[in-house]
Amino acid sequence: MKNAILGKKIGMSQIFTDEGKVIPVTVVEAGPCYVSQIKTEAVDGYNAVQLAFMDAKESRLTKAVAGHLKKANITAKKYLKEFKISAEGLELGSEIKCNVFNVGDKVDVSGYSKGHGFSGVIQKWNQHRLPMTHGTGPVHREVGSLGANSTPSRVFKNHKMPGDWGDEKVTIQNLEVAKVDADRNLILIKGAIPGAKGSVVTICSAVKA
């Protein structure tokens, strides 16, 4: 992994190329992040960099986290995330801004999808409703047959049924950076990314570029 940063999803917009082509983009307020810990193979068994993002009230932090950040001379931050990136040129408290990425870079974006709560099979799995006539009902949106009766006398694993939908980690790979605005800490990414507006996402250099 070459570069990584934490950001907040602002929403979707569009930009125009010099040829007049419309490109849908997602606006992410990326950083500034601060290096809160540098892990080395000699001490921790592997190399990694921990980043802190988004201001928070110090009263909201545990004593352990508050002391951890003070050790790196960082003010109270809400999110800590570890990345396996090179620590070359970095030290505790170093600032990382969105200009670590450039226009045209391929990135992987991870976030938590919108939570929809307990959902039926029509909403969750896009199944058809049951027939409206011929004795079906009174419920027409319930799940249909769950399998044979005497054989195997059970419901197979992984059968599509009602349940919680969303609120799970989703990663979209090989998205392209359309624009970087370092003055306003904004990265514009082509296409859609996971998560609701205001949710925290991670942007990393693409592993399959």
Image (tube, rainbow, N blue to C red):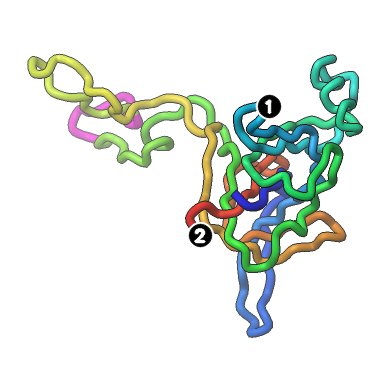
Which amino acid is tagged 2? Ala
Residue at which label 2 appears:
209
Give the residue drawn at x 52%, y 41%.
Answer: 170
Q: Nearer the viewer, residue 124 or 73?
A: 73
Q: Which mark is residue 176?
A: none
Magenta stretch holds residue 119: no
* Horizontal and vertical percent position of residue 105: 62, 63
Describe the element under mark 1 as helix, strand or loop. Answer: helix
Q: Nearer the viewer, residue 154 or 128?
A: 154
Q: Residue furthest bottom?
A: 19
* Horizontal and vertical percent position of residue 154: 19, 16
Give the residue drawn at x 63%, y 33%.
Answer: 41
Describe the element under mark 2 as helix, strand or loop. Answer: loop
* Horizontal and vertical percent position of residue 108: 57, 51
Q: Which residues are magenta?
A: 133-141
Q: How packed is label 2: few (under 14 Cα within 10 Å), some, or many (20 or more)?
A: few
Magenta stretch, overall SS: loop
Residue 27 occupies which quadrant of the picture?
bottom right
Say which of marks 1 and 2 sits in front: 1
Magenta stretch holds residue 140: yes
Residue at which label 1 appears:
43
Residue 21 occupies which quadrant of the picture?
bottom right
